[in-house]
Image (cartoon, helix red, strand yellow):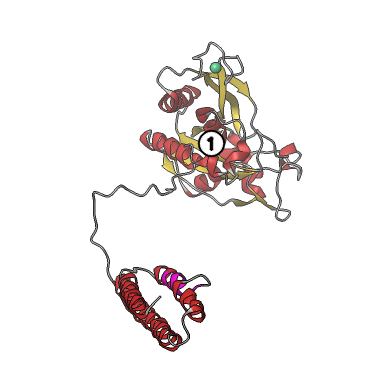
Amino acid sequence: MDVENIEKLESKIRWEINRCERRDDLQAVRVKYLGRKGQITLLLRSIKDAPPRERPRLGAACNRLKDFLEEQLAAKAEELSRAGEANELYQPPHDPTLPAHDGIRGHRHVISMVLRRMKEIFYGMGYSLAEGPDVELEYYNFQALNFPEEHPSRDTQDTFYVTDDILLRTHTSPVQIRYMESHTPPLKIIAPGKVYRNESIDPSHAAEFYQVEGLYVDTDVSLADLKKEVEIFVQQLFGPQTQIRFRPDFFPFVEPGVDVAMTCFGCLGKGCQICKQTGWIEVMGAGMVHPSVFRAVGYDPDVYSGFAFGMGVDRLAMLMYGISDIRLFLADDLRFLYQF
Ligand SMILES: [Zn+2]
């Protein structure tokens, strides 16, 4: 080791520091020369092995080299931080040929998608939108809809009461009453919205879910009109081959009341898993508006007639997409949600 070699090392250090692009690179250079096994560290250590008269000169040269390295590192660090600030201000021009980021994008919830489709169909059939409050008076939810005082659904077992006469609506039918109170026939509305039931939760029962209610009132509205309207709706939603079937059913606010089933879209009536081998799927409850309901809103039942229907949106969505557990709609599981 002699002074000439030390000077060569100086130009090597200058070159290495000059090509550093980041602070990490500078740190690597520092370790390379001044670390425990660094080249300058080893040089300083080896001085004691040199002939005694050369030691002072070598020692001074080594220390100069060490100072030189520190100066160069500091100068380069300063230069890099100035460049860094400049980089933050610099925005590269937009390059439309670069591949797109495969980012996560949100979309409508499956219930919103089905609800939207249903609304589109009904709007196309001349229905307009009506809405009412989720927190409802017992009067609108039950009395005005001809539910007798002792009707089991009035029980707190089935209904969430807020106070004695205020509750979370158990169906969207109170919207019928509110709408008829403030309008005169003819009227043709749908009332979509959330409803609440004090149910024990399982794969086919939820405490909150969506319904779409329909109401048509005019003079001379018949059960045949109801059948035609329902048929148009299910054929638009499930395809033109879909047939419907009416069977007698009971709901306090209609007379007669019917249970509406349609031919299974999975097997077209032959029998499959979706329809539990029956070939039929129940889609809604419906009927002709009960005279007591008309009287409650001040319509003369001898002048007006009308039909009402109501269906569960969650249930329809489950059928359409083959979803087996209603609880998935409210669980925020992205693996489920991103399938639609
Ligand atoms: Zn089937």
Instruction: Tell me if mark 1 has few (under 14), some (14-19) or many (20+) residues whose alpha carbon lies within 10 angstroms of its own.
Output: many
143, above or below 248, in the image: below
Q: Nearer the viewer, residue 7 or 161?
A: 7
- Image coordinates of residue 111 in percent, x first then y, are 51, 40
Q: Does the image show residue 173?
A: no
Name the residue that disc number 1 marks: 313
Q: Does the image show residue 38?
A: yes
Which residue occupies 54% across, 40% down?
335
Number of marks in the rendered image = 1
Tell me which segment is drawn in magenta.
Answer: 29-35
Residue type at the position of mark 1: Val
Which residue occupies 32% across, 74% down?
8
249, above or below 180, in the image: above
- Image coordinates of residue 13 in percent, x first then y, are 35, 74
Q: Quadrant of residue 40?
A: bottom left
Q: Is residue 220 left or right of residue 161?
A: left
- Image coordinates of residue 104 in percent, x first then y, are 43, 48
- Image coordinates of residue 310 in percent, x first then y, are 55, 34
